[in-house]
Image (spheres, grey):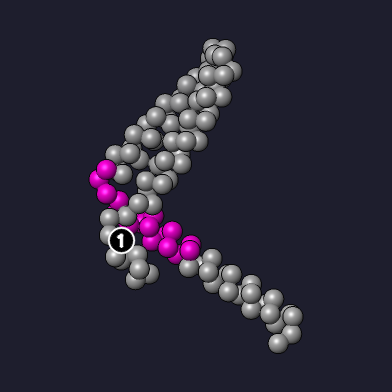
């Protein structure tokens, strides 16, 4: 087997593996989440939205809030987005994951 064939086989396997992972994420995104994680997702969206609103009002109305507060709110938005995304990927039935 030539080096070119080995490289092609390597990348074909990587692409197949990546395709499987993407399909698993799609399945988990569409699957039903437990009630607890739905509440976490809703809360994080509300908190992140509130932080975004404060930043927006600060820039529109020139409130000149402290830059440390704006930085903290920016981090809070990122954290809330990560929590909401993770909560969305949590599924009820773990047995069905092994079938995909």
Q: Is residue 22 magenta?
A: yes
Quadrant for the N terminus, please: bottom right
Please, what secondary structure does the residue beneath circle 1 have?
Answer: loop
The furthest residue to the left: 35
**90, above or below 94, in the image:** above
Q: Residue at x 27, y 49 (%)?
A: 34
> Is 35 on the left-hand or right-hand side of 68?
left
Q: Quadrant of residue 91?
A: bottom left
Q: Quadrant of the C terminus?
A: bottom left
Identify the residue at image location x=53%, y=69%. Answer: 17
Foreground residue among 35 and 95: 95
Residue 98 higher or lower than 1, as above or below: above
Residue 48 screen position, x and y as percent:
43, 31
Segment colored magenta: 21-36
Q: Position of residue 70 (x, y in %)?
A: 54, 21
Q: Is residue 55 magenta?
A: no
Q: Where residue 3 sits: x, y (%)?
A: 74, 80
The residue to which callout 1 is attached is: 94
Left or right: 42 in relation to 11: left
Q: Residue at x 64, y 72 (%)?
A: 11
Q: Residue at x 35, y 65 (%)?
A: 97
Residue 56 is at least partly visible in this image: no
Residue in front for this viewpoint, 65 or 79: 79
Quarter where residue 51 is shown? top left
């Amino acid at each position: 087997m030539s080096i070119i064939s080995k490289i092609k086989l390597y990348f074909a396997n990587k692409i197949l593996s990546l395709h499987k992972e993407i399909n698993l994420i799609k399945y988990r995104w569409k699957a039903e989440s437990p009630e607890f994680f739905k509440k976490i997702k809703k809360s994080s969206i509300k908190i992140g939205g509130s932080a975004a609103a404060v930043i927006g009002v600060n820039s529109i109305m020139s409130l000149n809030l402290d830059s440390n507060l704006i930085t903290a709110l920016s981090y809070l938005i990122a954290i809330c987005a990560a929590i909401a995304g993770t909560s969305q990927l949590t599924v009820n039935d773990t047995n069905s994951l092994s079938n995909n």
